[in-house]
Image: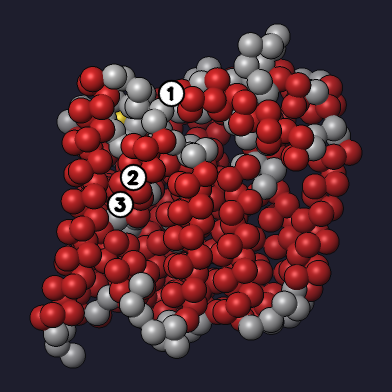
Amino acid sequence: MAVRPDTRRRDIVAAAVGVLLFAAVAVAGGVIERSSGTLNVSWPPLLADWMPHVGPGTPAAVAVAVLVVTYGPTAAEVLSWRLTLAATWASAMAWTFSLALVDGWQRGIAGRLTTRHEYVSAIPRFDDLWPALHTFSQHIVGGRPGYWPAHVAGHPPGAVLTFVLLDRMGLGGGGWAGVFCVVTGSSVAVAALIALRALGTEATARTAAPFLVLTPAAIWVGASGDGYFASVAAWALALLALAATRRVRRPAAAAIGSGLLFGLAVHVSYGLTLIALPGLAVLWCARTLRPLPYVLGAAAGVAGLFVAVGFRWWDAYPLLVVRYYQGVGGVRPYSYWLFGDLGTVVASAGLASVAGIGRLLRFPLRDNRAVVLLGCAFLLAIVAADVSGMSKAETERIWLPFTLWLPATAVLLPRADRRMWLAAQAVVALLINHLLLTGW
């Protein structure tokens, strides 16, 4: 079926508005940073430096992009469902690894989680696990003896504990940590497909698959802890969708698994409390609250476990706010980042997502109900995080649990245009990764 010119024009206009937003905050940010230095990023709105370059991952990244654009949509239609899931995960990993390796193994993967701000650097302080956890909150605020590195202090202890456990399993060091984040972060695409199929149709999920693979957000999945955090939240939502729609043999077990992951999510990242909004969208789409008691009970169990070892989320968060404003968060201007953060969403979600969001806001709820409800929920989560003022800058990384789902909105675009938009996703990612040296 031919696409009406006015329909295609609206999609292009939506993408153009996204580009203009990014350009506007980039120009304004450059002026502010040169005049006052208060943004604390070299190439606003992204934490990056202008450095055109190629690297070992360049040929692979181009090859993966060409293969997914050329064959991805067809393969997603004809493969069995299990093979579609496997191919999606494998393709997402290949895309993420290749983008990371544009900066080389050490700079792109192995060294990113070993800097003085990151989790791996704090592992030796957990040799005696109980005291480290029991006194964790006492070391959040800066200026006190033994205060935590920035990223350890900025997250509940579940974040650093993950890397401590990897180390105890013999998978220590930045290389294993980076690989872990890429592998788990790439699985978000699979979790999203499972949720979309459960809540909507298999055809919708299959259409979304190539877009969930070829997302610019993969730049920051490889390799940052937020890629892992995104996977925890994504699988919590996927299991909730399976439990709510009873698409599994044991819905109660799926609901309990979902609750355990929701509980873990808020104990690896404070900001993942906002994943409750997509969770509510899942229940709304499924038209049931049946899994809720199991989910809440399991999540409470995880919270109770952390309380038992001495960490209370509600006591720690106010201390985090103090630490946040002790650092660059207290200097970065809210008035700029309120809009600058939205510019990072354009970069990480890509132009197909922006065009899809344009349709999302005018699409009838009865059509592609799951995509519309989940898309709106993730947008609400982004707006809430933006308004909070606790995510000023670096949101191309911090908001991965939300932006990694936005490419699914591309299923709302006309079938005849999808390869064009898929190519646009690849071009945005390749340009960003080869023109800028990203901080994460």
Tell me the crowding category of disc 2: few under 14, some 14 to 19, or many 20 or more residues within 10 angstroms, Cα based. some
Q: Earlier in the sequence, mark 3 or mark 1?
A: 1
Amino acid found under the numbered disc labelled 2: Phe
Q: Position of residue 388 (x, y in %)?
A: 52, 44
Name the amino acid type tagged 3. Answer: Val
Residue type beneath disc 1 = Val
Q: CA distance from mark 2 to mark 1?
A: 16 Å
Q: Relative to residue 162, is residue 411 drawn left or right?
A: left
Task: Check contact, mark 2 vs mark 1: CB within 8 A.
Answer: no
Secondary structure, mark 3, is helix
Q: Is residue 151 above or below residue 196?
A: above
Which mark is drawn over residue 339?
2
**Residue 171 as seen in the image, left or right of residue 416:** right
Residue found 33% across the figure and 57% down from its top:
214
Q: CA distance from mark 3 to mark 2?
A: 11 Å
Q: Quadrant of the N terminus?
A: bottom left
Picture mark count: 3
Q: Quadrant of residue 223?
A: top left
First in residue order: circle 3 vs circle 2:
2
For residue 169, say whether it is visible: no
Foreground residue, 179 or 385? 385
For the point 37% across and 37% down, which residue is it? Answer: 335
Q: Nearer the viewer, residue 196 or 378?
A: 378
Residue marked by disc 3: 346
